[in-house]
Image: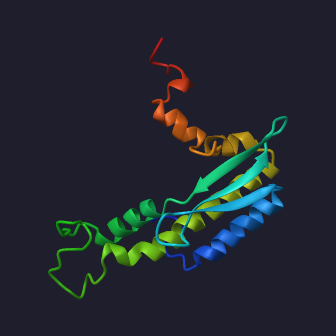
Amino acid sequence: MNNKLKNYTSDVPVLRSLAEIDGLLIAAGVSNISKEFAPSPPGKVAAVRFTILFPGQKAVTIRLPANEEGALNVLWRDYVGTEKLSADGQSVQRYDMRRFSKTKGDFKEQAGRVAWRIIKDWLAIELSRMRMQEADVREVFLSYVWDGKQTLFERIKADNFLALGPGKDHP
């Protein structure tokens, strides 16, 4: 089994993936799309927010972030493999300079391309499942409902998932 990160070789620019995400959302009938920018570097998109109608309820805002840092860490671990890292973890302790010539920072742009491509692919799949009536809009997006400060998932996680009630092993 290939254990590589999906789209790890993507050369699709982030802006193209974001435009494709916008197209998918527009076709799905959302009423608003906006971008949330990271504090740095300037112009870096951290999340896509959009407004969608939950059946029989009001419109809700959804926040879909891309985990570029997570993608960066996976790409770096795949590149490094079992080699020994420098004390700061940002480069390989090189014994053969020809084998390793990159640092972790060299993978940042690739991580952005990969992370946003994964979001675009996931969204396309989930919207297809909704069209086939295999999934409900609430089922797909509920954990991403945004109250202006945090997603529903983040709120439940902060409460140690107590809102979910006791599990099978608990009375």
Q: Is any atom of residue 156 visible in this view?
A: yes
Q: Residue at x 17, y 84 (%)?
A: 96
Image quadrant in which you'd find residue 76? bottom left
In the displayed structure, 107 sits above or below 135; it is: below
Residue furthest to the left in view is 95
Q: Residue at x 71, y 70 (%)?
A: 20
Q: Position of residue 115 (x, y in %)?
A: 53, 65
Q: Can you say which quadrant of the picture contains the N terminus?
A: bottom left
User: Does 136 sit left or right of 38 as displayed?
Assistant: right
Residue furthest to the bottom in view is 98
In the displayed structure, 39 sits above or below 145; it is: below
User: Does 141 sit left or right of 46 as displayed?
Assistant: right
Residue situated in front as seen by the camera: 49 or 87: 49
Numbered label tally: 0
Q: Residue at x 63, y 51 (%)?
A: 63
User: Does 54 sit left or right of 120 as displayed?
Assistant: right
Residue situated in front as seen by the camera: 144 or 11: 144
Q: Is any atom of residue 3 visible in this view?
A: no
Image quadrant in which you'd find residue 123? bottom right
Question: Which color mode does the image show?
Answer: rainbow
Residue situated in front as seen by the camera: 4 or 156: 156
Q: Residue at x 53, y 33 (%)?
A: 156
In the displayed structure, 64 sits above or below 112; it is: above
Q: Position of residue 74 (x, y in %)?
A: 39, 63
Q: Position of residue 167 (x, y in %)?
A: 49, 21
Residue furthest to the top in view is 171
In the displayed structure, 54 sits above or below 50; it is: above
